Amino acid sequence: MSGVEHTRAAISGGGRDDQLYASLESMPDGFILLDAAWRFTYINGKAEVLLQRGREALLGKNMWDEFPEGADTIARREYTRVKEHGGSTTFELDYPPLGMRLEVRAFASQGGLAVYFRDITGRHHTQETMRLLQSAISRLKDVVIITTAAPISDGPPIVFVNEAFTVMTGYTAADVLGRSLSFLHGEHTDPDELSRARDALRTGASARTEIINYTKDGREIWVEGEIAPLADDEGVVTHYVVVARDITQRKRAELMLKESTERFRIVAQTTADVVWDWNLVDDTMWWSDGMRSMFGYEPERRSATSDSWSDAIHVDDRARVLAGIHAVIDGDGEKWADEYRFIRGDGSLAQVTDRGSVIRDSDGRAVRMVGSMVDVTSQRELEAQLRQSQRLEAVGQLTGGVAHDFNNLLTVILSNAELLETRLAGNDHLHMLAEMTRLAAERGAELTSRLLSFSRRQALDPRPVDVAALVRGMDQLLRRALGEQVEIVIVADDDVWDAQVDALQLESALLNLCINARDAMPGGGVLTIDVANATLAGDGAQAAGEYVTVSVTDTGTGMNENTRARVFEPFFTTKEVGKGSGLGLSMVYGFVTQSKGRIGIESELGAGTTVNVHLPRSTEVRRDAGAGADEAAPTGHERILLVEDDNLLRAQVAGELANFGYRVVSARTGAEAMQMLREGERFDLLFTDVVMAGGMSGAQLAALAREIAPAMPVLYTSGHPETMMDEEGYLAPGVTLLRKPYRRRELAAKLREVLGAGAAKAAG
């Protein structure tokens, strides 16, 4: 028996006829019968389609065996309840295996169930979509209004408003449904704007409006709205959708901007900066009068476009600056700032900082930019000069520290070399080696002295100096420093007076002047150094007197009056960046004036330059530089307290002092020395380094020692005597200093000088 015959027999067996069977088979819903054991006893044709299974495969089979996914759903629970208690049930069921949502009705029937079900997937999706759409619209920040399409003239009635409408106007949906939008209009609503919108709608087009509406509490608000028609399948307009937003704040801002524009232009004309206003929509720029006074441009004669600005940016900076400003404009930035080179009206370059603020419309589009340009050329030059000064200071600190440590080593080398020269007088070969060692140490001492002079940590020690001999002695040094393209001529008579000056500092000053002269002769030339006596009249700052004049003359490019007036200013230089610090002549000026001398300059463009250095004539008798290493050094027998933190140097000096006949007690730190003094030890001389480890300097040690032994003389030694200088850069009064590195004879002579002075003071 086929499935259909079985089904027909099942129905007939139940007392139903062929007409009932035909009705069940023609139903639009699926229909099944289940017995008490959940077996299928009847399945109509629609049920076969919905269940996607044939009758032959299902009749007589257990429903939950054939559709196990349904066993844990609402269907099993509801079927069981109806089968056990009678009655009926209706529910909806999502059944993934069939890929559909079903609406199910079940009735108790002869110990089993009669079940009707239909596919409501499409209807459910439509309902869900409508629910989501209505929920989304109700939550939009923009106002959404839907009206019917007619009548346009009187205003079509409202059929829908969202929650944003109530927030903006104060009216609820119940207040407005069925009414036209005209109830929102009032005294200041523009009728022409309403008429224009109606005319657009009559043609079936969309319309955009900006009008004044009135809220429920009577406030005026500006509303921007877009009205679009909705048509049915035949193209007939049935409704209008209005999307609106409150633009009151924007309108107020536009009004305030309009009112402030004139104020802005008035203020811009009175400021010292260059103020600019760039309309980004039509690419026009407005410049304040600062463009004329600061950069030499006539604003009214310049192009009105942004090219008037970009073309004046230095070509090497242009791409970077334009890329930066357009990145802000094209992005969402509000502020722009940059620094670049700007070409003045006369062709010269200015360093400028430029800042601007972007003004955007309600859509975020940049429509305008306002800013100001400031000339920072002088400021940047000063900053560069300060950085150069700081670099020089750092180099000075480094060189000063190196010179200090190197002097300790040189003192040991020089002392031992001198001693070896004396001891090896009969051995020509070894004596020559010792002499070479001494000469090398002396050259090292000259180097450290120059380093300290450069670092300005060399206290001035003015003595009678044969300036003519000093200049002649610099001849080879100058030829090496200036190069073969410069011819050097030295004019110095033998009858030139001695000058009271620090010889090492004078050498450094003359070298600076000669290097400047060389730089003024890039193609080579003649450099003349003339040394002569001079008697100068008083000039207000200096009294009349006798001077030794050193004149440095070049055949270079010369300088104009403005440059000549500023040439001694710190950091002023006419050289290219990186070619000069602007400190050379200012250092010479400082040294000369500190030495109580004078300095002047004579120069003309194309006629070379002469710098005249006037040094005070010495009234003292010049002493020779020192005796040779083989001459006998003065000796003594006194008891000396030696304080030196360098172990190698302390041992060396202690040995030297013992060789001279002195009784020596050594200490590594000031604290050790003070401990000896406090314990009652007596000394004829304190010989101490100035800069020492241990937290106590030589000056501090001497001050404490005088509290215990007031009559004990003090001899300081240092290669870095910065702390011993007075405010003018001279050794402080009452200070006796032996500069490192020193020779054996210098050490012996200085000891006798200090001990002799101390003895004379005690006797007096």
Image: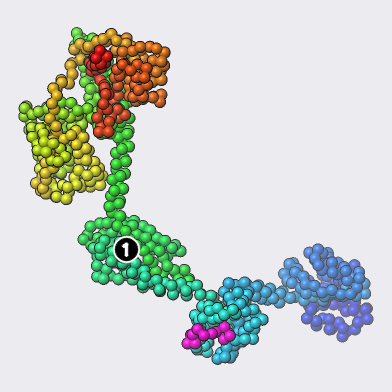
Residue 289 placement (x, y as % from top left): 28, 66
Count of numbered labels shown in the rendering: 1
Q: Which quarter shows the C terminus?
A: top left
For the question of whether residue 123 can be seen, the reply is yes
Residue type at mark 1: give it: Thr
Label 1 secondary element: loop
Q: Which residues are magenta?
A: 181-193
Q: Position of residue 29 (x, y in %)?
A: 79, 79
In front here: 56 or 213? 213
Q: Is residue 367 left or right of residue 318?
A: right
Relative horizontal placement of residue 347, taking residue 399 as reference (left or right): left
Q: Position of residue 525 (x, y in %)?
A: 10, 41
Q: Is residue 489 visible?
A: no
Viewer-proximal residue among 342 and 586: 586
Would you identify the image quadrant in which residue 656 lies?
top left
The residue at the point 28 percent across, 8 percent down is 637
In percent of the image, x 32 and y 63: which residue is there?
Answer: 271
In the current view of this chain or complex, which residue is farthest to the front? Answer: 764
Q: Residue at the spot x=37%, y=66% of the render? A: 370
Query: Residue 401: within the magenta?
Result: no
Q: Which image quarter holds the N terminus?
A: bottom right
Residue 372 screen position, x and y as percent:
34, 62
**106 w.r.t. 515: above or below:** below
Q: Is 37 situated left or right of 496 in this image?
A: right
Pointer 1: what residue?
Answer: 271
Is 62 placed left or right of 719 in the picture? right
Of residues 346 and 120, which is closer to you in this image? 346
